[in-house]
Amino acid sequence: MGPDPVGPPQFAPYHHPAAGWGAAKSVTRFLVKEGAYVDGPRAIMRMNHESGGFDCPGCAWPDDTKGLHLDICENGIKHVTWEMTRKRVGREFFAAHSVTELSGWSDFALEDQGRLTEPMVYDADSDHYVPISWKDAFELVGRTLRELDDPNRAAFYTSGRLGNEATFLYQLMARELGTNNLPDCSNMCHEASGRALQASLGTGKGTVDLKDWEVTDALFIMGVNAASNAPRMLTALADAHRRGAQIVHINPLIEAAATRTIVPHEFVDMALFKSTKTSTLNLQPRIGGDMALVRGMAKAILEQATSDPRALDRQFIERHTTGFEAYRALCEDTPWEEIERQSGLDRAEVLKAARVYRDADRSIVSWCLGVTQHEHGVDTVREIVNLLLLRGNLGREGAGPSPVRGHSNVQGNRTCGIDHRPSPEFLDRLAEACGIDPPRAHGLDTVSAIEAMRRGEVTVFVAMGGNFALAAPDTPYTHEALRGCELTVQVSTKLNRSHLVHGRRALILPCLGRTEKDHQRGGVQSTSVEDSMSMVHLSVGMKRPASPHLLSEPAIVAGMARAALPDSGTPWEWYVEDYDRIRDTMSRALDGFEDFNRRVRLPLGFRIKQPARELVFLTPSGRAEFSTAPLPDVVPAPGTLALGTMRSHDQWNTTIYSDNDRYRGVRNLRTLVFLNADDMRERGIDELDPVDITSTAKDGSTRTLNGYLAIPYDIPRGCAAGYMPEMNVLCAIGDHSTQSDQPIMKHLKVTVTKA
C-alpha cells in the first residue's frame, strides 16, 4: 500500500514524547522530499488564520480560541504539502499508462504522481483515460442521470473534505433529482455517535466547545489516538495537565498521546526538550470492553451515593432526565464479575476511573472510532451519556459529551444536508427555501449503496472526494460493485485507487484544493467548514491553482446539476458566481445558519446553536433519556482474537505518506499485526514472524491475509490490531452494526496462525 520500503522491517518500542522534535524532523524531511522549501512554510504560516488564510484540510479539531496562529500540527502540514506538490498528472501521463498497468501500482505511487490537471474520461477500447471537455463531461453525467428509469438508481457519496457551500448544492441536486441516496464517510465512522446522541439528548452532535476543554476538571479520552488523528488535541491535553485537571485515557493500546508531549509552538519547551504529561491514568480495556467499563463507573457512583448524596446530582436528574430508576436497577443487577469479564479490567481499575469522575466537579467524555465501530457502538455512546447525566455533566461550562470527528468538514457535511435519513423538518425547510419537492423516503447509506450496486440496482455512483474503493469494507466485494455500474464519477485532487476501480464508463473530474484561490465572477470566493465542536468559519485559498483547467467543487456540482436537470428553476450558475448567494439560501434552509454571511465573517466564525447545551432536549419525552441496554458479550471465543483496524501515524485516512509508524516504533512495514506477547507465545509466533490472519464473518464466510508480520505490543490478551485500508478486506460487507449500520472495523473476529 505504501511506498517501496527503504530498508528491512524494523520494530523498536517508542518511548519519546509525542510531537516535539520528532514531529519537527518529520515535517522537515517531508518538505524537502516534496520540494516545498518556500510554498510549504508560507502555507504553514497561513493555516488556521482568522482571515486571509485557509482552514487546515486535515482533521476537524477546532481552531485555538486565543487566536494562536501557530496552532498547527505535523499531519496538517503533511496534508497541505501533499496537496501543494509541484508534480502533475495530465493527459500525457494517462496516454503513457493504461488503467490495467496503473492497477498494479501501489496506492502510494498513484497519489505520489501529483495533482490532476484536467477532466478525463475512460476509453474502454484503449484502456486509457483520455481528455474530455468540462462541457462534455457534464453532459455525460447529465444524460446518464436523465436516462435513469428511477432516480434511486444513482448514489451520491461525499467524504469529509467537501466545504459547506458545495455540500448544500450537492444534496440539493440529489433531492431535486428525486433521491435521498446520500451515503457519506460518517456512515463508516461516527454514525453511532449521531444516533446515540439523538436518542439520548435530541441532538446528533457533542455539546462542548474548546473553551469547555480549557476549564474542565476531568477529561476521559476513549478510543482516540490523538497524536495521529487529532494532533492539535495535544495542546489541550498539555494545558489541562498543567492546570491540574485529571486526564484518563481509555484505549486497548497506550498510544504516544496518552503519555507526554512537547507542543511545537511552545518554543521554550522545545529548546529545553521539556515535555508535559498528557495523562494521569491509562486504562486498557479489551477491544469492545468500553461499555462494560462505563457501566462499572456508573455502578460505583450509584453505590457511593448510598453513603454520600453528593455522588449524584439528584436535582439535575429529577428536573432534566427520564428513566433513571430503570437505569439504577440495571446497574445494581449487573454483577461486578461480569463487568470485569467484559471490560477486561480489574474492579480496582474501574474504581480508579470512577473515583476521578466522582471527585471532579466538571467532566468531559471524548471518544472516537474505537468506541463507534462496533456492533454495540450506539449502546456504548448512550452509556457514556448515562454516566454524564448521573452527575449533571451537561448544560454547564466544562462538561458534556465531545465526539472527535475525523476529516475537516465531515460534521459540516451532515449539518448541511448529506444525510440518507433526513428529518421531515429539514425537508420542509429545504422545500420552502429552494422551491423543490424533495423525496421523503429514506435513501441508501454506504453499506447499502455498495450492496445495491452489487445487485445492479444502483448504476450511477458519484463521489465528491475521498477514495471510496479503498475506504469501504470488504474490498473485493466493493470493487466488484463499483465495476458493475454504468457510470462512476470521481471528483478528486489526486490520482487514487477509485479511478482504477470504475464502472463501464468513468470520469475523473479534478477540483481545486482548499489551499488554492477560487476565482469566480464575483471575485475570489471563500468556503466555510464546521469543526468537531460546531464552530463554523471561513476558509480562503492563497495559492495559484495547480492547473487553469481546475474547477471548484461548487462549480462542478452546479455543472452536473444543470446538465441533469435542464429545466430546473434552481439558479445553479448564479449561485456559483458568488458563494454569498449560496449562504443566503442556506440561512433560510438550515436551522442554526440564520444571518449566515454576517456571522461567518466574525472572528473565529460562529457556533451553531445547540439546544441540549441549553438543557433543551428534543426527545419524545422532552428530557434527557437514560438507556438500559444489556452489556454485550465481547469476550473472544477460545483460539480467536478481536482485531481492530487503525491508521499508522504517517497516514491520513487512505493517504499513506510512508511505511513508517513513528509513535509505534515501526519502520518500513505496513503489512503487520500487533499482538499480545502471551498470545504470540501460545501460538508459537516470534517477533516479525510471518502469519496468516483469517476473519470469520457473521454469515460464517472467511477472508484471509497471508504473510503479515507479527509485532509484540502492549495490548490486552485476546486483542490484535493492524492498519486500514489494507485490513479492510477482512471486514465482510455483512459485518455491520445492526444499531448504526457502520462496518465493525474495530471488532473483527480473527484467528492468527504462523505462516
Image (tube, rainbow, N blue to C red):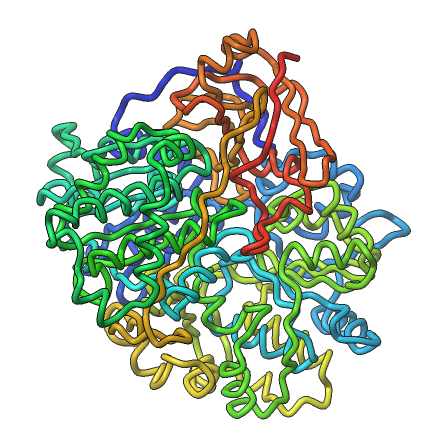
Residue displayed at 15% across by 45% down: 239
- Residue 522 seen: no
- Residue 460 seen: yes
Towards the viewer: 680 or 618? 618
Q: Quadrant of the C terminus?
A: top right
Tell me: residue 675, above or below residue 557: above
Residue displayed at 51% across by 45% down: 374
Question: In the image, 249: left or right of 191?
Answer: left
Residue 673, horizontal then vertical, whole percent: 53, 23
Residue 339, horizontal then vertical, whole percent: 37, 36
Which residue of the protein is positioned furthest toward the right in this rendering? 125
Instruction: Using the rendered view, name the quadrant where residue 110 is placed.
Output: top right
Residue displayed at 57% across by 26% down: 637
Residue displayed at 14% across by 41% down: 241
Instruction: Using the rendered view, name the quadrant where residue 354 is placed.
Output: top left
Tell me: residue 204, above or below residue 601: above
Q: Quadrant of the N terminus?
A: top right
Towards the viewer: 264 or 676? 676
Residue 142, horizontal then vertical, whole percent: 75, 75
Residue 602, horizontal then vertical, whole percent: 25, 75
Towards the viewer: 137 or 624? 624
Tell me: residue 326, above or below residue 332: below
Number of residue marks = 0
